[in-house]
Amino acid sequence: MTTEPILLASVNSHSHDPDALAFERLLFFSDAVFAIAMTLLAIDIRLPEGPAGGDMAQRIASLAPQVVAYVVSFFQLAQFWNAHHQLFRYIVHYDAWLVGLNMAFLLLIAFLPVPTSVLGEHGVGPITVTFLASCLTLVALSELGLWLHASRALVARHVSKKTRRGITIKIVIVAAVFAGSIVIAQFSPVGALLSWFLIWPGHAIVERRYH
């Protein structure tokens, strides 16, 4: 069995080639997993039971930790979806390794509602934030592995080495920020969550240098 990636298909939206259609199915499936994961984030947000005639405002206010967890995780999932979408603007071929790496990435994406539920139920604390940050770090690392494989031979010919390097650095920044927030969470869980905003200026610097 050869270890070299075997070219299976190239993207052609105007073709009825089975391989091209299979590539599109891969993208549609990826989008579906993201959509389901985003939907599941809100499943556990339910108004707590209380006595008839009880303080409804207080019951609604008690949902705040769950809503915060939902917003935080939904935003991160949206960022990963956008990044995945951007990567596949450059990837025009696929092979068996890419399919496997993409499935590993989606496996981690589909798991994100779990740490989100824990964060919402138990509140912002060192352990809950560390759990979510660890999962996000793994997602970013899996995305990095996917891109490093694809960038070798599966991207369009017009994609320069400079552009490929820039994309790699942007993904590394995401992984590094999430990994760094695990350490910060031990001292300041809220600070760990806020540190995720560092991804934006980091990406802005890379965009100016490598665009």
Image (spheres, helix red, strand yellow):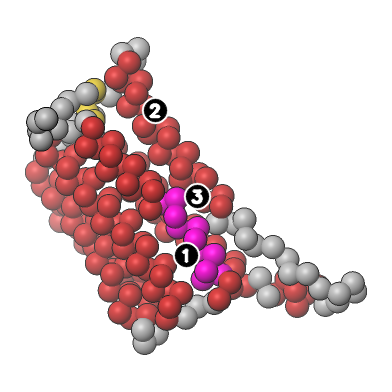
Binning the other alpha carbons within 10 Å of mark 2 as few (below 14), some (14 to 19) or many (20 upward) gives few
Instruction: Please name the residue that numbered disc 3 is placed on.
Output: 37
Instruction: Please name the residue that numbered disc 1 is placed on.
Output: 115
Report whether residue 163 is seen.
Answer: no
Q: At 43% across and 74% down in the image, what residue appears?
A: 129
Sequence-earlier tag: 1 or 2: 2
Q: Position of residue 48 (x, y in %)?
A: 73, 69
Report whether residue 176 is seen.
Answer: yes
Q: Position of residue 135 (x, y in %)?
A: 37, 62
Q: At 18% across and 57% down in the image, what residue appears?
A: 169
Q: Amino acid at mark 3?
A: Ala
Q: At 33% across and 56% down in the image, what residue appears?
A: 139
Using the image, tell me which numbered label, if any, was put on residue 25. 2
Sequence-earlier tag: 3 or 1: 3
Q: At 41% across and 51% down in the image, what residue appears?
A: 109
| C-alpha distance separating marks 3 and 2 | 18 Å
Q: Quadrant of residue 140?
A: bottom left
In the image, which is nearer the foreground, mark 1 or mark 2?
Answer: 1
Which residue reaches farthest right? Answer: 53
Q: Quadrant of residue 85?
A: top left
Q: Amino acid at mark 1?
A: Pro
Residue range of the region highlighted in magenta in the rendering: 109-120
Label 1 secondary element: helix
Q: Is residue 182 above or below residue 199?
A: below
Asked if residue 115 lies in the magenta stretch, the reply is yes
Give left or right: position of 62 versus 163.
right
Which residue reaches farthest bottom? Answer: 187
Asked if residue 110 lies in the magenta stretch, the reply is yes
